[in-house]
Amino acid sequence: MKYDPINSELFIKNRKNFMAQMKPKSIAVFNSNDIYPISADSTMPFEQHRDIFYLSGVDQEESILLLFPDCPNKDLREVLFVRETNEHIAVWEGEKLTKEAATETSGIQSIFWLQDLEKTLFEMSTYADNFYINTNEHYRASVETETREDRFTKWLLAKYPAHSVAKSNPILQDLRAVKDTIELDLMQHACNITEKGFRRVLGFVKPGVWEYEIEAELLHEFVRNRSKGFAYTPIIASGNNANVLHYIENNQQCKSGDLILFDIAAEYANYKSDLSRTIPVFGKFSKRQKEVYNAVNHVKKEATKLLVPGTIWKDYHVEIGKIMTSELLKLGLLDKADVQNEDPKWPAYKKYFMHGTSHHIGLDTHDYGLIHKPMIANMVFTVEPGIYIPEEGFGIRLEDDVVVQEKGEPFNLMRNIPIEADEIEDLMNS
């Protein structure tokens, strides 16, 4: 891993919080992700399953975590299985976790090699009545691939049919939505790396540059600051490309007079940041572009103020719709008749602002969080309004990551990243 070691107190605390919500006489099981093949002997870069990382800090394949808080055998209350390492593996694949390193990373004392899993699990199962299995129940999830977790669950339930089954995900949705101070520091670090990348491209962009060249500048800055790279597939959309919400080709030349919509951010230690900015290729907004830009920025500022304890996500979006409608009326994009005759299920403002304004962010870009529950302190949300005008050849989106506070306005993790239109122009022309 490129990132600095994380204090194991985070993972010790996370396990304690999870186990406090388990039923008596229960074992919870968490698997690493697979390494996915591409073709021949090629594989995709490994990405750890966020749940086992959240609970152990282990960031390698073929690892399994078992939690059994009331096991009569005290040595089997927290057990981590890792792939046995040796000199041959170290030479050909790189160093893997030793038992000692696994304990240092996770704070777990009972570390076993993976080949000891079945006999250890059998002993644990004789004391248990229930298994907690880990299913993906995120509201955006649409998974067609059978995961390592899925395969293990099939084997587990076939091997132990007399045990009852419970779900880990509802517990994790609650826990992971509220960030520890260590997590907030890691997210701040990811945002700081993102800031360095954005400032770099402000001095790089000029008419004639290609979108992929800008992508390369960002990646260079992210990796040199100990990030794996982009937190998600980057969007660098010049001109009318900005009106494609998930434009990822990044293969067009940037022309004078156009805007570039960025939706780009760095990760750090698996924690994500999520930034959107829109800048003028020539270094100066036209009067109309700045007018729309300032409207989006106003909506973002007002939306941020609403991210306070007690707010319901669905109600929040209704209020932002009202704010956006007011701005679109001022811009002449809507008139009063459009609003009066709108379909309540698809309000008039949706013609120019068709996506949501905020989502949870953390270990995943669209992180865990039960959106029907009220917001509470230390939840982290994006704030990302936009106005998209294909007929005028540009779209604008602005986005920051903010932390809900117990009292007062949310804390902006991206407070140091330039956003005001005049500041963007000054920096691009300095």
Image (cartoon, rainbow, N blue to C red):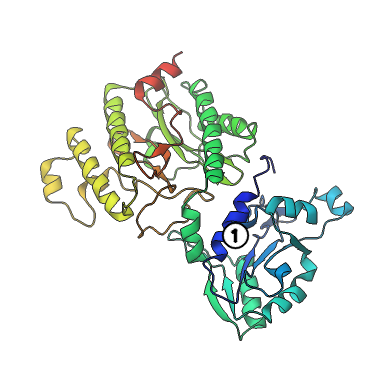
Instruction: Place residue 299 in its image quadrant.
Output: top left
Q: Where does residue 24 sit, x and y in percent of width and height? A: 56, 75
Please name the residue that numbered disc 1 is placed on: 15
Q: Position of residue 401 (x, y in %)?
A: 43, 40
Q: Residue at image x 73%, y 56%?
A: 40
Residue furthest to the bottom in view is 162
Kind of residue at disc 1: Arg
Query: Which is nearer the eye, 362 or 20?
Result: 20
Q: Nearer the viewer, residue 429 or 365?
A: 365
The image quarter containing residue 257 is top left
Q: Which residue occupies the foreground of this view, 366 or 99?
A: 99
Residue appearing at x 56%, y 67% in the figure:
134
The quarter of the picture where the N terminus appears is top right
Residue 98 visible in this rendered orientation of the protein: no
**In the shown orientation, is residue 19 left or right of residue 377?**
right
Q: Position of residue 246 (x, y in %)?
A: 44, 45
Q: Residues within 10 Å of mark 1 (few under 14, many from 20)?
A: some
> Residue 140 falls in which quadrant of the image?
bottom left
* Residue 91 location (% of width, % of height): 86, 48
- Report whether 328 appears left or right of 313: left
Numbered disc total: 1
Q: Can residue 383 be seen by looking at this rendering?
A: yes
Q: Secondary structure at mark 1?
A: helix
In the image, is 7 to the left or to the right of 342?
A: right
Q: Residue furthest right?
A: 87
Q: Residue at x 53, y 44 (%)?
A: 181
